[in-house]
Image: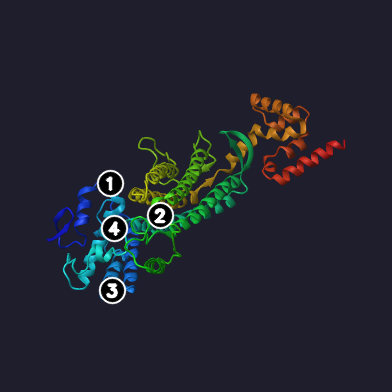
């Protein structure tokens, strides 16, 4: 064991760990969720890159001796690589705006650098967690910057997942292009369309989500590093902010820019609401599609039965042969969770009083969880459900041809009242709209087959031309 000191006193620290007394305090105070900083590897990677960029900038500026700077940079590389992830045991929930996480990183990097130079852990007179590792920094600018990078990298995963989902829907909308089906509005029979057109709507919905995710990534590239405590750049030196951003851009491979207003950057995290809202939009979009699939695949004998979802597991412990729409149901549940995450983020952003938002821990926990859940669910939905969706063309066409809603075609020809009478008689007798129109002498058999064929109603240009030709023929007598 080694002994370390802080403002509260001293503690014994196991010799085999790289973290120190500040991390022990966090372990005493914040063991609440079971989710550790080590469970968010991108977060650790981001902090490692920030510390590395700061060490290199401070070495360039003569604030760190070259051999000290080099040892710190080597230690940061170990953090970035993930080799030291198990040295970040703090709970993701913590007070102080993430001070425990920042100090955890400072201690780990300091002790690893000491070890590299041949000194014992805790030899802070040589390399100190605050004096050297945290030089020209504050938790208040390090943590928001780390949150930004962590979010960006996770958004890339979500972008890939949504693009994959979109590609599946592109293929399905083409595959189902020729399948005629009944449209439904307010869950009641409506005019026909094709299953391909319906899936084309899903395709465009997910396309917008994909573009939205790409768009919000820009909010992760304007960073507050260099602001230090409240935005005044206290305890930095001239040229530090420019150098640290230059090196950080190099390490991350991102085109970073410094925040236009450092005070705003520390006070306000509204960009997290914007990003969260777009993630929520993706989850809701998938849930909407999932709801439709559950309806359209209901049955198989007493439901819509227009679609067949690929079975992925037995559906019941009591009813043999039953298969449930478990993947769409999963999507629904994840959507509800993501909406909850978004509500937590919104409240946390609202709670940023005066010159710093200290709610970064709850924001990163909920934002990264929401992005991760949505990404993984999109991939599962694509692979285990949408790719294997099959249509029941016969059932789809049966519903389309038996719908009373095709009486809408009669309205511009004979007026709404006549069309309503035909629809009402069809409802009372169970006969088709075409048969009643012929029986009443409104249309000939040939005209009814042409005007009221559901297949002609799903093509706007074709439908308009048919109606126009009929009206012109009638006008000529």
Q: Residue 102's mark?
A: 4
Residue 175 locus on image (x, y percent): 58, 51
Label 2: element kind: helix
Q: Residues within 10 Å of mark 4 (few under 14, many from 20)?
A: many
Label 1: element kind: loop
Sequence-first tag of 1 and 3: 1
**Alpha carbon separation for disc pair 2 and 4:** 20 Å
In contact (CB < 8 Å): disc 2 and disc 3? no
Q: Nearer the viewer, residue 105 or 16?
A: 105
Q: Nearer the viewer, residue 380 or 86?
A: 86
Q: Is residue 69 left or right of residue 409?
A: left
**Alpha carbon separation for disc pair 1 and 4:** 19 Å
Q: Nearer the viewer, residue 358 or 39?
A: 358
Residue at image coords 19%, 69%? 126
With respect to residue 394, does 225 lie above or below? below
According to the picture, the residue beneath numbered tag 2 turns out to be: 263
Sequence-first tag of 4 and 3: 3
**Alpha carbon separation for disc pair 2 and 3:** 32 Å
According to the picture, the residue beneath numbered tag 3 turns out to be: 70
Please indicate, yes or no, whether residue 108 appears anywhere in the rendered image. no
Residue 416 locus on image (x, y percent): 72, 29
According to the picture, the residue beneath numbered tag 1 turns out to be: 33
Q: Quadrant of the N terminus?
A: bottom left
Sequence-first tag of 1 and 4: 1
**Alpha carbon separation for disc pair 4 and 3:** 20 Å
Sequence-first tag of 2 and 4: 4
Q: Residue furthest top?
A: 428
In contact (CB < 8 Å): disc 1 and disc 3? no
Q: Residues within 10 Å of mark 1 (few under 14, many from 20)?
A: few
Q: Residue furthest right?
A: 477
Q: Residues within 10 Å of mark 2 (few under 14, many from 20)?
A: some
């Amino acid at each position: 064991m080694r002994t370390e000191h802080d403002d509260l006193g001293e503690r014994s620290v196991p010799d085999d760990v790289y973290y120190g007394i500040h991390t022990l305090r966090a372990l005493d105070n914040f063991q609440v969720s079971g989710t550790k900083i080590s469970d968010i590897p991108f977060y650790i990677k981001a902090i490692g890159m920030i510390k590395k960029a700061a060490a290199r900038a401070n070495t360039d500026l003569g604030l760190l001796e070259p051999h000290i700077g080099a040892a710190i940079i080597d230690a940061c590389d170990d953090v970035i690589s993930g080799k030291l992830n198990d040295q970040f045991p703090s709970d993701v929930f913590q007070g102080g705006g993430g001070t425990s996480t920042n100090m955890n990183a400072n201690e780990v990097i300091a002790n690893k650098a000491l070890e590299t130079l041949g000194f014992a852990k805790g030899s802070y007179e040589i390399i100190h967690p605050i004096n050297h590792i945290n030089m020209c920094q504050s938790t208040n600018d390090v943590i928001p910057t780390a949150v930004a990078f962590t979010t960006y990298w996770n958004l890339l995963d979500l972008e890939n997942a949504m693009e994959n989902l979109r590609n599946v829907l592109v293929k399905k909308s083409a595959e189902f292009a020729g399948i005629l089906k009944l449209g439904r509005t307010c869950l009641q029979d409506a005019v026909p369309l094709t299953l391909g057109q319906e899936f084309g709507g899903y395709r465009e919905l997910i396309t917008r989500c994909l573009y939205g995710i790409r768009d919000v990534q820009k909010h992760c590239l304007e960073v507050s590093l260099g602001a230090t405590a409240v935005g005044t750049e206290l305890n930095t030196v001239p040229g530090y902010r420019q150098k640290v951003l230059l090196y950080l851009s190099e390490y991350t491979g991102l085109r970073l820019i410094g925040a236009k207003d450092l005070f705003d950057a520390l006070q306000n995290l509204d960009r997290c609401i914007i990003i969260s809202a777009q993630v929520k939009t993706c989850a809701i979009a998938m849930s909407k599609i999932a709801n439709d699939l559950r309806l359209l695949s209901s049955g198989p004998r007493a439901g819509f039965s227009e679609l067949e979802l690929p079975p992925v597991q037995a559906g019941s412990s009591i009813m043999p042969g039953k298969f449930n729409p478990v993947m769409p149901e999963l999507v629904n549940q994840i959507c509800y969770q993501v909406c909850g995450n978004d509500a937590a983020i919104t409240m946390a952003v609202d709670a940023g009083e005066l010159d710093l938002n200290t709610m970064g821990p709850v924001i990163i926990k909920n934002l990264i969880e929401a992005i991760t859940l949505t990404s993984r669910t999109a991939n599962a939905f694509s692979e285990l459900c949408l790719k294997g969706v099959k249509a029941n063309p016969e059932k789809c066409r049966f519903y389309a041809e038996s719908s009373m809603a095709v009486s809408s075609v009669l309205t511009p020809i004979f007026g709404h009242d006549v069309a309503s009478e035909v629809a009402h008689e069809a409802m009372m007798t169970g006969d088709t709209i075409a048969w009643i129109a012929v029986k009443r002498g409104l249309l000939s058999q040939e005209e009814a087959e042409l005007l009221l064929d559901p297949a002609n109603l799903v093509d706007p240009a074709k439908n308009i031309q048919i109606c126009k030709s009929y009206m012109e023929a009638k006008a000529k007598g």
